[in-house]
């Protein structure tokens, strides 16, 4: 459907990922072990969940910088609802996630209702939501969650980390929606030419509202998993998350100008980045070196993408 | 000033070049230009004399803008030559044309809103001090002098351009051209966006320039201006040079017939069947101030032509019917029932289709394939369960390709690679796949070649014959007259006249379109 030409970037990325895994396995014997790989999957899940929604956002030609702040805000609300308002923990989780989803909806509302560029709108809410999180938390961290709660971030099902199952299911759902449904078609159409999409009877604003709300929802889900994994709630959680997420999505071949991108690409991009981070660390490369390598890989991927762009007819 | 690539006229720098006695500022000899094999300017020859206003007229698509762009150095002629002061020149870029003393005041003014008036006038040729810094004193003094010489004493040279009216910006563009020592000034529809008071002022400036020996090439559709200003008129039709006449030898009717020319009836398909019931009716529909109390009725099986100048409210009316800019007052009736239309989606579901004016921006997603484009307005219909049925999407596109004779490799070809005519057929295919009952076509054949044009006309007739109601907007008078069963003329956002097929002659409709309506335009 999104014909073979679009899969070329993904093919190259897949080959690159395999090569990276191979080289990293050579460099360190601790890298390519089941235990390490599953653990890396665990660490990747939060960024991964948000990246799924971010793929939709960027395919429409938008961006959401506020996802890290939404994660932080949700985490704080979860702790505050439970510890200081005395709600039962399940209710606190649901309520906090509803707030995170609402924060995403607000992004979409500002963008569609007032025609604010997504970069500006979410730059503002990045500050706003983080400020709210810090204000509400008053620099207190929340700990002492009940044991069952840690299952989300630390538990395993059939030997695979729980959140990896969640990420897997969410990935399949996202890939199906983007690739096979009218909603996905509308998402691509909006990114490729918003005016023509509107003139074809596509509900542009409603589609965008859904997508930004989904970004809020998945950021909130990531927050619950994050809190469960690290057992503590702090207001600076998720700081800088947006950059990791956007890096993964763009590395995955999604055009920052909109209209192009796939969930498969995003997943490959995320795996490559996580593998490089972990593998290089295990091989004794210092933190700074790892960042340099990731930067270079990103530039390389974009250059390759641009090369294909030029070759495409037109 | 830049370095001059030509010898001769440009070598004098700020000092007016020494024009050799009898030489003409510009002369075109047998100029031709083709795009993608279509000849848009064919063998055109005329000359411009110093100090004259030379009007360039013709319908949309007659080749005026291409010709202007050739003179301005934006396009290069395929054949023929351009002479400046008797010497053959070749313009590789607009810079070369500037250097030869030819400047253009474009329809969309190309100024920098965040710079001051003086900075804009001298952009690219800023006076410098000995140290290479900007000589502000000289620049401001010269800017002041230039504007004073254009009777624009009221313009503040230190003001940012962003805050100025269109009329003032235009004066700045003219001053800028003079700062470049332009001896030929091309003005492309200079009054299209001006209020009446500014039009008068512009005309005074044009006369002032002529008195100084600057030649003006004046492109306009407005008859009163042509007769008030021009010395000579050159008329183009279908890229051909119909004639150049002193303005005293022609009248309005003569000019219209020169522009429209050919016998129209023969070219357009004859009406099939008879008109049915009224399907769409507008009663005093308005949208803000661009659509004002429009009332019209459209019948099944009828092609209703909407004529008028650009900006007369034709497209705006279509956008209101299609729900892009929903009506702010008045009623839209479909099948006699009041039906508010709040969005394009609602319009589509009511059986209204709109083939927009701007194919590339509004009609198509050029980066996507034919099948993706055709599916876009039909997603609900092309589903199986929750999913888009990929096979039916391809089948639908294959059907449209066969039905409309779209010349393409297949449903998966990217639309960008198709020619204008075939792109238009994809837009039509997309909308006819929605099974509409009302089809609005805005400039259905703009920018497409003669063959594809005839095919689209034939198709429109066939659809009307099958009972579809078609509302056609066109700036090409022959198309309006040839295709329409009835013609409405719009001006100032409202319908000003209605003609039956028999009454709708080029002269009558053309006169109604170009009649200046001072109160509305100034409002």
Image (spheres, coloured by chain):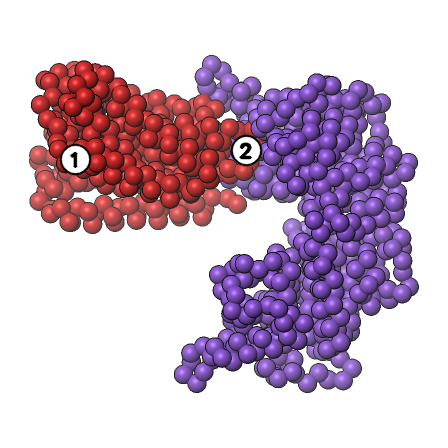
Q: Is residue A39 above or below residue B102?
A: above
Give the residue pinned by disc 2. Answer: A198
Q: Is A201 placed left or right of A106 in the picture?
A: right
Corner quadrant of residue B276: top right
Mark 2 near mark 1, Cβ–Cβ under 8 Å? no
Considering depth in this image, is B81 or B478 the residue closer to the camera? B478
Q: Secondary structure at mark 2?
A: helix
Q: Is B244 placed left or right of B187 in the picture?
A: right
Say which of marks 2 and 1 sits in front.
Answer: 1
Q: Secondary structure at mark 1?
A: loop
Give the residue pinned by disc 1. Answer: A138
Q: Is residue B395 above or below residue B421?
A: above
The residue positioned 46% from the left and 19% from the top of the image is B387
**Precedes in sequence: disc 2 or disc 1:** 1
Q: Residue A83 location, x and y as percent? A: 15, 22
Considering depth in this image, is A26 or B250 the residue closer to the camera? B250
Q: Residue B170 location, x and y as percent? A: 63, 63
Q: Is A39 placed left or right of B16 in the picture?
A: left
Residue B79 in sight from this viewpoint: no
The residue positioned 54% from the left and 62% from the top of the image is B161
Q: Kindly indicate which chain is depicted in red in the rendered structure.
A: A
Estimate the spatial distance between the alpha carbons at disc 2 and disc 1, rounded to whole Å: 45 Å
The residue positioned 81% from the left and 56% from the top of the image is B223
Mark 1 crowdedness (10 Å alpha carbons): few <14, some 14-19, many ≥20: few
Q: Is residue B201 above or below residue A154?
A: below
The disc numbered 2 marks a residue on which chain? A
């Amino acid at each position: 459907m999104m014909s073979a030409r679009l899969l070329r970037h993904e093919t190259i990325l897949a080959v690159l990922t395999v090569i990276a895994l191979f080289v990293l396995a050579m460099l360190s014997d601790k890298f390519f072990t089941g235990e390490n790989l599953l653990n890396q999957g665990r660490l990747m899940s939060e960024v991964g969940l948000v990246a799924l929604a971010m793929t939709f956002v960027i395919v429409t030609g938008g961006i959401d910088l506020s996802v890290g702040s939404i994660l932080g805000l949700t985490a704080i609300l979860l702790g505050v609802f439970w510890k200081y308002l005395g709600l039962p923990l399940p209710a606190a989780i649901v309520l906090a996630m509803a707030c995170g989803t609402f924060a995403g909806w607000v992004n979409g509302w500002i963008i569609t209702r007032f025609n604010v560029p997504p970069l500006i709108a979410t730059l503002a809410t990045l500050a706003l939501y983080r400020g709210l999180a810090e204000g509400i938390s008053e620099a207190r961290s929340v700990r002492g969650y009940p044991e069952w709660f840690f299952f989300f971030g630390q538990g395993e099902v059939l030997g695979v980390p729980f959140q990896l199952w969640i990420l897997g299911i969410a990935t399949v759902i996202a890939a199906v929606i983007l690739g096979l449904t009218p909603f996905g078609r509308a998402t691509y159409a909006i990114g490729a030419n918003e005016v023509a999409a509107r003139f074809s009877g596509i509900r542009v604003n409603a589609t965008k509202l859904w997508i930004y709300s989904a970004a809020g929802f998945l950021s909130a889900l990531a927050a619950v998993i994050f809190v469960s994994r690290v057992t503590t709630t702090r207001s600076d959680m998720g700081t800088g998350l947006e950059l990791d997420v956007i890096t993964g999505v763009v590395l995955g071949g999604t055009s920052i100008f909109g209209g192009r991108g796939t969930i498969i690409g995003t997943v490959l991009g995320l795996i490559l980045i996580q593998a490089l981070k972990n593998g290089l660390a295990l091989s004794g490369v210092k933190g700074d070196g790892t960042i340099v390598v990731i930067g270079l890989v990103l530039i390389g991927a974009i250059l390759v993408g641009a090369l294909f762009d030029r070759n495409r007819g037109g | 000033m830049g370095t001059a690539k030509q010898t001769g006229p440009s070598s004098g720098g700020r000092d007016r070049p020494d024009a050799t006695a009898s030489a003409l500022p510009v002369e075109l000899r047998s100029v031709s230009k083709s795009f993608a094999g279509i000849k848009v300017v064919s063998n055109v020859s005329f000359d411009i004399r110093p100090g004259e206003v030379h009007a360039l007229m013709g319908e949309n698509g007659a080749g005026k803008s291409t010709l202007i762009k050739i003179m301005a150095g934006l396009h290069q002629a395929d054949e023929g030559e351009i002479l400046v002061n008797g010497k053959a020149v070749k313009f590789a870029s607009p810079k070369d044309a500037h250097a030869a003393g030819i400047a253009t005041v474009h329809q969309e003014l190309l100024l920098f809103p965040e710079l001051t008036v003086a900075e804009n006038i001298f952009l690219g040729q800023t006076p410098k001090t000995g140290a290479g810094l900007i000589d502000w004193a000289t620049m401001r003094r010269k800017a002041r002098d230039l504007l004073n010489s254009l009777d624009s004493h009221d313009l503040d040279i230190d003001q940012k351009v962003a805050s100025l009216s269109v009329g003032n910006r235009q004066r700045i563009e003219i001053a800028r051209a003079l700062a470049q020592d332009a001896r030929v000034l091309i003005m492309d529809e200079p009054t299209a966006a001006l209020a009446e008071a500014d039009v008068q002022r512009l005309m005074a400036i044009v006369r002032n320039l002529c008195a100084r020996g600057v030649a003006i090439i004046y492109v306009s559709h407005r008859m009163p201006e042509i007769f008030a200003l021009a010395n000579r008129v050159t008329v183009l039709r279908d890229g051909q040079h119909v004639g150049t006449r002193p303005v005293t030898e022609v009248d309005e009717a003569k000019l219209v017939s020169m522009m429209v020319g050919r016998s129209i009836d023969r070219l357009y398909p004859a009406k099939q069947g008879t008109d049915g019931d009224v399907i769409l009716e507008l009663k005093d529909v308005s949208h803000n101030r661009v659509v004002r109390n429009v009332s019209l009725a459209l019948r099944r099986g009828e092609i209703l032509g909407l004529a008028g100048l650009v900006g007369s409210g034709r497209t705006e009316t279509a956008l209101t019917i299609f729900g892009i800019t929903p009506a702010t007052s008045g009623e839209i009736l479909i099948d006699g029932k009041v039906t508010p239309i709040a969005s394009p989606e609602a319009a589509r579901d009511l059986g209204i289709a709109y083939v927009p004016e701007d194919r590339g921006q509004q009609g198509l997603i050029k980066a996507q394939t034919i099948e993706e484009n055709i599916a876009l307005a039909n997603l609900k219909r092309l589903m199986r369960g929750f999913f888009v049925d990929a096979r039916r999407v391809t089948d639908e596109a294959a059907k449209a390709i066969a039905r409309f004779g779209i010349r393409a490799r297949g449903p998966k070809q990217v639309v960008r690679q198709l020619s204008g005519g075939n792109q238009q057929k994809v837009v039509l295919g997309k909308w006819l796949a929605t099974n509409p009952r009302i089809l609005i076509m805005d400039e259905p054949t703009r920018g497409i070649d003669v063959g594809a044009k005839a095919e689209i006309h034939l198709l429109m007739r066939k659809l009307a014959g099958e009972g579809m109601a078609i509302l056609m907007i066109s700036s090409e008078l022959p198309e309006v007259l040839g295709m329409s069963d009835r013609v409405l003329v719009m001006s100032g956002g409202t319908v000003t006249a209605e003609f039956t097929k028999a009454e709708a002659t080029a002269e009558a409709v053309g006169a109604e379109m170009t009649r200046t309506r001072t109160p509305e335009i100034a409002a």
